[in-house]
Amino acid sequence: MVPTRSLASFESVPQDDRLSELSAADLFDLDVVESVTTGQTPEHFARCGYVPLPGLLTELGLRELRSVIDRLVPSGRRKDFEMECMDGTPRHMSTLGGVVLAERAPGIVGLYHNNQLRAALGRALGLSLTTADDPVERHVLNMLHEAGDTHGYHVDDYPIALVLFAESPDCESQCGRLEFCPVGQAYEVATRSHQAGDAYLLRSDLFTHRVQPIHEGCRRTVLNFAYGVDGHDVTATPSASLLYD
Ligand SMILES: O=C(O)CCC(=O)C(=O)O
Ligand SMILES: [Fe+2]
């Protein structure tokens, strides 16, 4: 889909946004989706809430995504606060929300709307995935670049999150890992590490999740694509506007 843009914002789109020119097959190894989820049932996903997609981004996909994101990083908005509507959990990070990405990174918007990708993810989960109505929340960039940066425990408004890693810490002590558990069952917390080029799917409205604080010198930069599920109503919280407006 070609996003609509004002003339002024169109002029600010850099020439080097080559993501728009590349196909899903250039950017994603969709076999990863098929192979990782082969044999997993929708019931398994409902129970575990998480599907790892190691190496979902091709080498080319990671390179092109990083070059677009590197250009966006300086415009990140610093967020340091406790989110009241999520039990006062901390946010220490820089972000760019969906509206800014739509103006400044048409290639990322194109990836979000890529039907081939969404269909493959939906097949793997046994769900019919829809794009999100909320222009702020549908695609966001989360940048953890300073010592102690963390994205504290929360649930998302939309039911399915695809998180794509442009950068991930590789320090020995493994900071910045994902932790998640079914809502209200903190004793069942699982912890997962990811590398640049990896991705994961999360049932993000029913599994509480957070990113552990990162250490000095480490960087963790992800894109989060939020999807709906056909027939499932979304209840909006103030969290997206607090983090991404
Ligand atoms: O960075 C992550 O792994 C999780 C991101 C996330 O939970 C979110 O953007 O809502
Ligand atoms: Fe989340």
Image (cartoon, grey):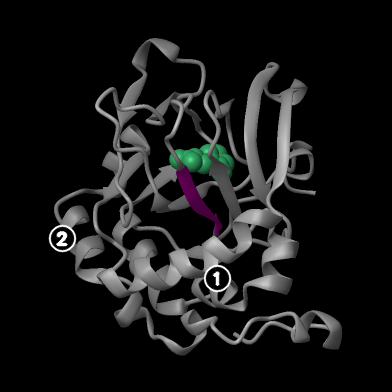
Secondary structure, magenta segment, majority class:
strand
Left or right of 28: which side holds 84? right
Q: Which residues are magenta?
A: 220-228
Task: Residue 127 in the image: state x and y as whole percent.
Answer: 41, 58
Q: Amino acid at mark 1?
A: Ile
Q: Is residue 178 left or right of residue 244?
A: left
Residue type marked 2 = Ser
Out of 168 and 178, give the one closest to the viewer: 168
Ranked by sequence position, the earlier of labels 1 and 2 is 2
In the rendered view of the protein, which quadrant contains the N terminus? bottom right
Ligand 2 lies in quarter: top right
Q: Name the secondary structure under disc 2.
A: helix
Cα distance between the residues tagged 1 and 2: 25 Å
Percent position (x, y) of residue 160? 49, 50
Relative to 140, say whether 88 is above or below: above
- What's the residue at 60%, 55% (across, down)? 73
Q: Which mark is residue 108?
A: 1
Look at the numbered disc 2 and say if its residue's Cβ is closer than 8 Å to ligand 1. Answer: no
Q: Which residue is mark 2?
A: 35
Height in image: 222 above or below 181?
below
- Residue 204 seen in render: no
Badge 1 vs badge 2, beta-carbon distance below 8 Å: no
Quadrant housing residue 179: top left
Crowding at label 2, few (<14), some or many (≥20) Cα neighbours within 10 Å?
few
